[in-house]
Image (cartoon, rainbow, N blue to C red):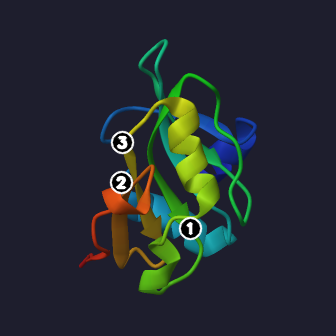
């Protein structure tokens, strides 16, 4: 149902705090093969979920990236790419979270690999 709502709204849906979990984001990625991002507008404080493509996509400027999913079911799916780090830099943000599509691993990552936490198993 949430996937239908996201797509009906043009790919970006407002959500309340706590309304969508990392496991929800992982499930959406698992079903579609696309990445999904949860972000917050720095102007209004409103949270959103956005469907991206299979290798990422854009979120609006002046946002804070809370978490995003990456397709794949293994631990390596949560290793950040240079595009992930560039997004943090562009948003003036120090860290965010990646979750794999299986919902079994996550990682808090930073602007540089030195700022990354280790891959964390979920469940």
Residue 101 is at least partly visible in this image: no
Label 3: few (<14), some (14–19) or many (≥20) C-alpha neighbours in 10 Å? few
Residue at mark 2 to residue at mark 1: CA–CA distance: 15 Å
* Residue depicted at x 46% and y 72%: 78
Label 3's element? loop
The label number, if any, that marks residue 70 in the structure image: 1
Residue at mark 3 to residue at mark 1: CA–CA distance: 20 Å
Q: Where is mark 2, residue-wise?
A: 21
Label 1: few (<14), some (14–19) or many (≥20) C-alpha neighbours in 10 Å? many
Q: Which of the image's four quarters has the N terminus? A: bottom right
Query: Residue 84: x percent and y percent?
Result: 56, 54
Residue at mark 2 to residue at mark 3: CA–CA distance: 7 Å
Q: Earlier in the sequence, mark 3 or mark 1?
A: 3
Label 2's element? loop
Q: In this rendered view, identify the residue nearer to me: 97 or 34.
A: 97
Q: Nearer the viewer, mark 2 or mark 1?
A: 1
Query: Residue 61: x percent and y percent?
Result: 63, 26
Q: Nearer the viewer, mark 3 or mark 1?
A: 1
Query: Residue 103: x percent and y percent?
Result: 40, 74
* Residue depicted at x 30% and y 41%: 18
Q: Earlier in the sequence, mark 2 or mark 1?
A: 2
Label 1's element? strand
Q: Where is mark 3, residue-wise?
A: 19
Residue 46 is at least partly visible in this image: yes
The label number, if any, that marks residue 47 in the structure image: none
Label 2: few (<14), some (14–19) or many (≥20) C-alpha neighbours in 10 Å? few
């Amino acid at each position: 149902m949430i996937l239908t709502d996201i797509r009906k709204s043009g790919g970006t849906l407002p959500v309340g705090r706590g309304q969508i979990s990392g496991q929800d984001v992982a499930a959406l990625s698992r079903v579609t093969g696309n990445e999904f991002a949860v972000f917050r507008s720095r102007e209004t404080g409103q949270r959103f979920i956005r469907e991206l493509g299979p290798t990422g996509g854009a979120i609006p400027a002046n946002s804070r990236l809370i978490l995003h999913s990456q397709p794949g079911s293994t631990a390596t799916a949560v290793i950040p790419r240079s595009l992930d780090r560039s997004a943090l830099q562009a948003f003036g943000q120090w860290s965010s979270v990646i979750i794999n599509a299986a919902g079994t691993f996550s990682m808090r990552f930073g602007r540089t690999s030195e700022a990354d936490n280790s891959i964390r198993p979920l469940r």
